[in-house]
Image (cartoon, rainbow, N blue to C red):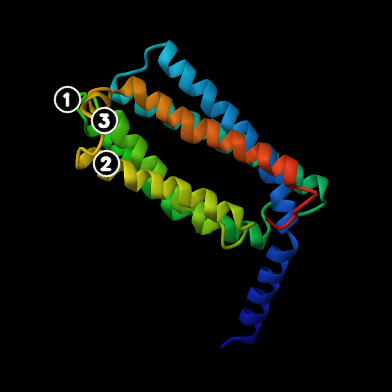
Amino acid sequence: MNPNWAEENLQTIRTLMERSAVYRRALAPIMTLAGIIGLVAAAAGVLFDINRTKSFGLFWLGVAVVAIVVALIIARRQAMKDREKFWSPPTRQVAQAMALPLAIGFILSLFLVILDKDDAPASGFITTFIWMLFYGSALYSAGFFMPRGIKIFGLIFVISALFLIVAVAERWLPQQLLDMLDNTSAHWLMGFFFGILHLAYGVYLYFTEKKNPVA
């Protein structure tokens, strides 16, 4: 084993542990603003009747890009405030951990949006399940380098997505609910998971930051 490689990895791990509180402080505004963006986007999707499959998919992909840009800006400002390098080795570790699940979810959902020529009523729900599954996987992967609460938050998305996929496929839900599986109600589902849950987690981080800096 290369001693320089081992020393570099040990230093990266030590730095990640030391920056746990820093990441946590950045997560609070990121999650809060992401939740607000998700809620506003869900309301806009319903209000402006963005219900065709392609429109639904492209709309929420655009929302995701906005949320990512906002998150990067906040993270950069936090790094500057703490006099840290933004694109440091620990940051690269986190980015690499999240990159593959996010990329797969993006590509798969984009293919579904482009290839869906029938504009099936439940296409929005299928796309939502995919986003929840791979986004949750990305958060869980990042949780190995960040506060452990991120792993739990990611698991909520993964378990919820798997449950909903099976529940719909096996028709565990009442027929009245199954009949409501259209792109309009998919906006509300997106608003709940990518809006309300993020907002709630952001508020939780704000109120517990001083009491429990490693949670």
Callout 1: 10 Å neighbours few (<14), some, many (20+)?
few
The amino acid on which the numbered mark 3 sits, given as a three-letter code, is Ser
Gap in angstroms between the C-alphas marked 3 and 2: 16 Å
Q: Secondary structure at mark 1?
A: loop
Q: In the image, residue 128 lies at what x, y percent?
A: 36, 35
Gap in angstroms between the C-alphas marked 3 and 1: 9 Å
Judge left or right: residue 18 versus residue 54: right
The amino acid on which the numbered mark 1 sits, given as a three-letter code, is Asp
Label annotation for residue 167: 2
The amino acid on which the numbered mark 2 sits, given as a three-letter code, is Ala
Gap in angstroms between the C-alphas marked 2 and 1: 23 Å
Tell which tag, 2 or 1, sits nearer the viewer: 2
Residue extending farthest left: 118
Q: Locate the C terminus by quadrant.
A: bottom right
Earlier residue among tags 3 and 1: 1
Q: Provide the residue designation for mark 1.
A: 118
Tell which tag, 3 or 1, sits nearer the viewer: 3
Contact between labelled residues 1 and 2, with CB atoms less than 8 Å apart: no
Callout 2: 10 Å neighbours few (<14), some, many (20+)?
some
Question: Where 99 sits versus 196, above or below?
Answer: below
Q: In the image, residue 200 lies at what x, y percent?
A: 60, 36
Q: In the image, residue 37 lies at what x, y percent?
A: 56, 27
Q: Provide the residue designation for mark 3.
A: 123
Between residue 133 and residue 111, name the one nearer to us. 133
